[in-house]
Amino acid sequence: MGWVQAQPHDMFGYAEGYRTAAVVLFESAVERGMSPDHLVFPLTFLWRYHVELALKDIIATGRQLAGEPWGVPPHHGLLDLWNDAKRHVLLCGDPAAPELVNVEANLREFEKIDPGADGFRYPLNRARTNRSLPNAPEHVNLGALHEAMEALANFLSGVRSELGGRLEYDMERQMERAHDHE
């Protein structure tokens, strides 16, 4: 296997791995003419985890740009992560962009359905006393879900790219300054 272990602070491979897995799983089911209904749990889990990691990547990169130490929140709540990430996201474009409303709406829907971040992995909640997804809709259009998640992932990818480019630029400038002072 020709994989490269990520650097300790590099979340790109992890986030993109879950995204790619979601895309491949969905497209494979469609190409084979399979009903992707039985794939709702793994497919939704892959998308949700991609979004969580992408938000954590935005937070970590944004913190570095702000001169703060690298770090990610230990929790899994998408709305809490979004609220942490938003200050960094707003540096990348129009704070009144309609995409921000769409992003937050998608995150709210995920949070409503799977607040503990484990509902798409297990049939029971952590206490094993109730169904894990009591607020899930009765029917899920996986094509619509996949399309919405692709749009969300593209938005987050753009933010991650912008922040990563800024961080790289800042690091190059610091190296140049250090070299000039030698």
Image: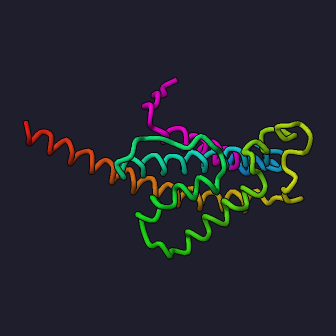
| Residue 45 on the magenta span | no
Placement of 95 over or under 11, stated as above or below:
below
The magenta stretch spans which residues? 1-26
Residue furthest to the front in view is: 68
- Name which residue lies at 66% across and 62% down: 148
Q: Looking at the image, how many numbered discs can be counted on the residues?
A: 0
Residue 17: image quadrant is top right
Q: Is residue 143 left or right of residue 100?
A: right
- Residue at figure coordinates x 19%, y 41% from the top left: 175
Residue depicted at 46% across the width and 31% down the height: 6
Report the front residue among 107 and 14.
Answer: 107
Residue 18 coordinates in the image, percent (x, y): 61, 42
Give the quarter of the figure containing the C terminus: top left
Relative vertical location of residue 34 with respect to residue 98 in this rendering, above or below? above
The answer to whether residue 96 is left or right of residue 115 is: left
Q: How far across and how far down the image is residue 64, in percent?
A: 38, 47
Percent of width and height locating residue 14: 54, 38
In the displayed structure image, the side of residue 42 where residue 38 appears, left or right: right
Q: Nearer the viewer, residue 48 or 4?
A: 48
Return the residue nearer the eye: 65 or 103.
65
Horizontally, is 124 left or right of 86 in the view?
Answer: right
> What coloring was used for the rendering?
rainbow
Does the magenta-highlighted stretch encompass residue 21? Answer: yes
- Residue 41 lies, in percent from the top left, at 78, 45
Classify residue 16 by image quadrant.
Answer: top right
- As drawn, which residue projects farthest toward the right? 129
